[in-house]
Amino acid sequence: MQDSAFLDWIRSTFVLGIPLWSLLVALVATVATYAAILLVLGVLTHRARHWAGQSHSGVAATVVDVLEGTSRLLMLVVALLVGASFLDLPGRWESRLSQLWFVAVALQMGLWGMRAIGIGVRHYLARHGSSGMTQVGASATLMSWGLRTLLWSVILLAILSNLGVNITAFIASLGVGGIAVALAVQNILGDLFASLAIAVDKPFQVGDFVVVGNVAGTVQMIGLKTTRIRSLQGEEVVMSNTDLLKQTISNYRPMRERRIVFTFGVAFDTPAEQVAAIPGVVQRVVEGLPQLRFDRAHFKAFGASSLDYEVVYIVEDASFNVYMDRQQAINLALLREFRDRGVQFAFPTQTVHVASVPELRTAAPDAAAGGTGGAGGFAAAPGSAAPPAAPV
């Protein structure tokens, strides 16, 4: 009798116009839903953590971090909305509950997105932060800010659209404003994106020796807008990142060895036996020096004033100073070898062949006898002998 009376009391009691029985059912549904959500999240997190431990996958670790960022408060709101669906509410409240469902889910997706962006930015800093690029931190901050702004803008527009707000005009206004801003700062944005491209693609790093156009030097700093290069003459060259990436960049840091080609010439009167022996002499000289690898030496061509040879060898060191030291040693050794063999290096010469010499005009016989000379005659200058007369 007491149980029946208690049940009758529950059925007949109202709270704020809602039967107490319905409120108890909604409460039980809320608790059960919240417990089920926590259970599912726990199972998914445990599986993802096990997956990450077995495969050492970055994706699995990211999933674990994202799931651990689930808001317990929003899950409680979702559970309350589930429980509220068991209540006998007016029609306008049912539509409001569906909108609140969407708001709660959208906010939770935003929190997951924020977590994922934070993880991505941390991985970016860990990968590129040790490269010496000063723009890495600034570019990471810029990238994080841009992605977070885009994420929450999309979520906000989706929530407003779900609430019945016409966002078409708002999106059009944002588009026009964005285009105007982009046109106003297109050069700055171009340099910023070029800076991100340098940080991600790494065509060069701080400390690399590069040649860009007519500029050769060491990279001192890579900024958000410009890159600074210390040239061989000592001055600092500041180049726009956009203009820098438009040119061909020669980076000497990855170079492990140098391929050297040089030529020399010997005199044309060198005997043929000596001409044939010179490549072997060059080979012995190159192979006798450290850090060098001989490739080839050939009598290449008949030059304008020399017999031309071409020599190719490899310097097993990227240092320019090492290359110059070895080239100097080769040159000195060839000087000694050729001197001992009687071979002369060629130098620019020209031989002029005169086909004929014009005949010299002389004075008439009477002029030669002491006259003053007639027309076309020549008089001897004082203190000089008269030119001999032409034979008659």
Image (tube, helix red, strand yellow):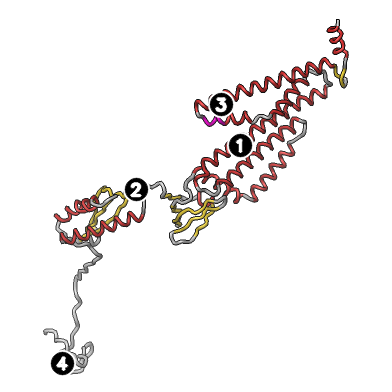
Question: Are the two marked residues, 4 and 1, in contact with CB atoms closer than 8 angstroms?
Answer: no
Magenta span covers which residues?
Answer: 57-61
Q: Which quadrant of the figure contains the N terminus?
A: top right
The residue under the point 26% across, 58% down is 331
- Residue 58 covered by magenta stretch: yes
Q: Name the residue under label 3.
A: 49
Whole-angstrom CA distance, mark 2 to mark 3, is 47 Å
Q: Mark 2 points at which residue?
A: 257
- Residue 379, quarter of the rendered image: bottom left
Residue 15 spot, x, y in % from top left:
87, 20
Residue 136 spot, x, y in % from top left:
55, 46
Question: Are the two marked residues, 2 and 3, in contact with CB atoms closer than 8 angstroms?
Answer: no
Whole-angstrom CA distance, mark 2 to mark 1, is 42 Å
Question: Are the two marked residues, 2 and 1, in contact with CB atoms closer than 8 angstroms?
Answer: no
- 1 or 3: mark nearer the eye: 3
Kind of residue sitting beneath label 3: Arg
- Residue 21 covered by magenta stretch: no
Residue 166 spot, x, y in % from top left:
76, 34
**Residue sticking out furthest to the left:** 392
Query: Relative to 42, is 330 above or below?
Result: below
Q: Is residue 128 left or right of residue 179?
A: left
Q: Is residue 179 left or right of residue 7?
A: left
- 2 or 3: mark nearer the eye: 3
Q: Name the residue under label 1.
A: 117
Q: How crowded is mark 2: few (under 14 residues within 10 Å), some or many (20 or more)?
A: some
- 4 or 2: mark nearer the eye: 2
Kind of residue sitting beneath label 1: Ile
Residue 91 spot, x, y in % from top left:
83, 22
Disc with the residue nearer the chain's start (4 vs 3): 3
